[in-house]
Image (cartoon, rainbow, N blue to C red):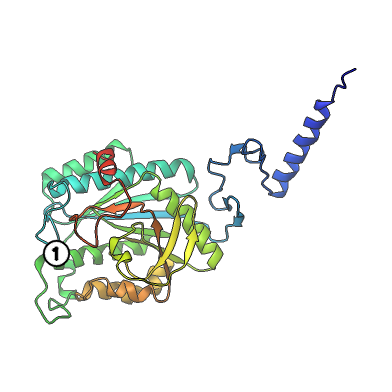
Amino acid sequence: MKKIENTSKTHFIKKIFVKLCRIMGYEIIDQSNFYSPTADKLVNDILSIQGKKSINLPLGEVKITRRVKSLDIIIRTCASVQMLTQNKDRIFKKDKIEYTLRSINSILKSVQFAKNIHQNISFNIILVDHNSSNENIIKIEDMIKKFNFEYKLHNLKISEFIEKINQTNKKNEKTSDNQLSNMCNIYKSLELSKTSQDLIYFVEDDYIHEKESISEIIFTYERIASLTKNEIVICPTDYPFLYMKAEDTKLFLGENYHWRKINESLCTFLMSKQTVKKHWNKLISMCQQEHYPFETPLHEIYKEEICISPVPSLAIHFTNINSAFGLSPNKDWKKLWDENK
């Protein structure tokens, strides 16, 4: 006679076990179907809980001791200047406003995606614009309004900062008007960051982002800052110039990306308010006189603070195709461009 097993008792015991694991904060995985009954999710879903724990199989759980509270995104726009320091065409050879709009669109899409996951974080959108036409300003604002995001738009007044800037650069040459306006824009962005509560993302208007970029940055900041017990700096772009010399590095695991320690970046980066305050004089010095390379003060900061960038890239710098400071390797540039039309 066939033996009938009592599955109801087994299921009852399993339910009790799952509840106990949830109460105690443990995560369990059913290896037969890649399902986590404690999280009620498949393991390919997001298992991490922002502000509490970072979970990455098979490494398990990292308890979050550095919770992100808010993110201010300060976007520096200037649709009137095609290229800051070059006369070459950008990839796809469009007017600058096209890159600005697609960049802003990609950032807002990424914020919208992040808001659904990181519901306890406040997001603030701030724009600092220099010399864009009224027509282009309207285009920018119309795009933001489609997302129903609150935002602040500041029209940069060069006169507020120009007297604070040495108009002779480190090569003892006259600094170009375009570079002076760029330095004023960075100066204004740093001044605005004084009212921020936690993280600040300083970003230029020719970086097109992946949809998951902001969420990945938040998860990764919490995970790596909790592991290292220190504030960190994040650059979202995997620049070509990072592969032009062999350097020792450190490798970190984020939510869905690998991240490596870097010693150099351009002027799109994320810092905490605490780090901005700590290195205020170095950051402002980048705006007070043109260095060579321009980002030298940032590189000095990276000698003291860990700066990491993702592999592959989460944001692509849409500049000239031959530029070592532009298009990230092993990415589908055209796809990302088309997705943010």
Residue density around tag 1, few if under 14, some if 14–19, many if 20 or more, within 10 Å: few
Residue at image position (60%, 57%) is 62
Which of the 4 image quarters holds residue 305? bottom left
In the image, residue 11 above or below residue 76? above
Above or below, comparing residue 285 to residue 54 in the picture = below
From this viewpoint, which residue is outermost toward the bottom? 172
The x, y position of residue 201, in whole percent, is: 35, 58
How many discs mark residues in the rendered view? 1
- Locate residue 232 relative to residue 109 in the image: left or right: right
Q: Does dot 1 land on a helix, a strand or a loop?
A: loop
In this figure, which residue is indicated by the disc labeled 1? 85
Q: Quadrant of the N terminus?
A: top right
Question: Is 8 left, or right, of 202 in this rendering?
Answer: right
Q: Nearer the viewer, residue 99 or 141?
A: 99
Seen at 36% across and 71% down, the residue is 246
Q: Nearer the viewer, residue 256 or 271?
A: 256
**Identity of the amino acid at label 1?**
Thr
The image quarter containing residue 63 is bottom right
Residue 103 is at least partly visible in this image: yes
> Left or right: 24 with respect to 174?
right
Q: Position of residue 181 (x, y in %)?
A: 15, 64
* Residue 67 higher or lower than 36, as above or below: below
What residue is drawn where x is 56% and y is 48%? 48
Q: Residue furthest top?
A: 1
Residue at 37% over, 55% down: 72
The percent position of residue 233, horizontal first and vertical second, equals 41, 65
Looking at the rendering, in which quadrant would you find the C terminus?
A: top left
Q: Residue furthest right?
A: 1
Residue 150 can be seen in this image: no
User: What percent of the width, then of the height, locates residue 265?
Assistant: 31, 66
